[in-house]
């Protein structure tokens, strides 16, 4: 296999469609920017992003976590297949978080979240799972026969 087509280098992976290979890096950059933009989004669209917690401690903690994730998603866009574990964690945790928030939005009658942060989490999780690069194929290790002793 041509070195530029080797799985795990972020360029191309066997088993992944060319469309998905082209879409994944910009999707990661966009997702990273949304994570970095969580604070401005909660300021300009509070009904979709602000949960109205009593104190700001929770808000600040979750914003710093998502800002950090955003930076790493943008960095992962350079070589998505090499960052597959980060992408899997992001996908599954985003789906879990989004589903939990959806239930809370309905139970608390805060339906604006269903088109705001809930939708963002579900699109991020489902999008990453759909675009997920396959596991990198590791080349078989060469095992040389030991030299015969005389």
Image (cartoon, rainbow, N blue to C red):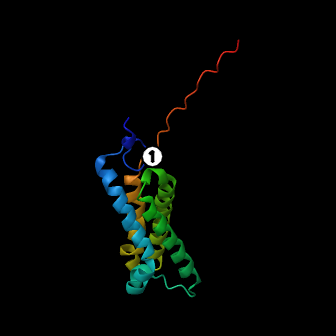
Q: Quadrant of residue 142?
A: top right
Vertical position of residue 117 compared to residue 22: above or below: below
Instruction: Judge from the rendering whether residue 111 lies leftward or rightward of residue 62; answer left or right.
Output: left
Q: Position of residue 130 (x, y in %)?
A: 37, 53
Instruction: Tell me the element at label 1.
Output: loop
Please tell me which residue lies in front, 39 or 73: 73
Q: Is residue 109 visible?
A: no
Vertical position of residue 18 compared to residue 71: above or below: above
Please tell me which residue lies in front, 101 or 49: 49
Q: Position of residue 33 (x, y in %)?
A: 40, 71
Vertical position of residue 124 compared to residue 50: above or below: above
Q: Alpha-carbon neighbours of circle 1 within 10 Å: few (<14), some, or many (≥20)?
A: many
Counting the numbered discs, the total is 1
- Residue denoted by label 1: 8
Q: Position of residue 59 (x, y in %)?
A: 53, 81
Q: Position of residue 15 (x, y in %)?
A: 37, 41
């Amino acid at each position: 296999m041509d070195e530029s087509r080797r799985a795990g280098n972020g360029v191309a992976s066997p088993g992944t469609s060319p469309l998905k290979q082209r879409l994944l890096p910009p999707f990661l950059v966009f997702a990273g920017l949304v994570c970095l933009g969580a604070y401005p989004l909660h300021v300009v669209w509070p009904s979709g992003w602000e949960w109205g917690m009593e104190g700001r401690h929770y808000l600040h903690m979750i914003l710093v976590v998502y800002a950090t994730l955003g930076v790493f998603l943008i960095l992962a866009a350079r070589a998505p297949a090499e960052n597959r574990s980060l992408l899997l964690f992001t996908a599954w945790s985003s789906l879990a978080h989004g589903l939990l928030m959806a239930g809370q939005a309905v139970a608390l009658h805060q339906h604006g979240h269903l088109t705001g942060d809930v939708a963002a989490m579900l699109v991020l999780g489902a999008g990453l799972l759909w675009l997920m690069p396959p596991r990198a194929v590791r080349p078989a290790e060469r095992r040389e026969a030991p030299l015969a002793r005389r």
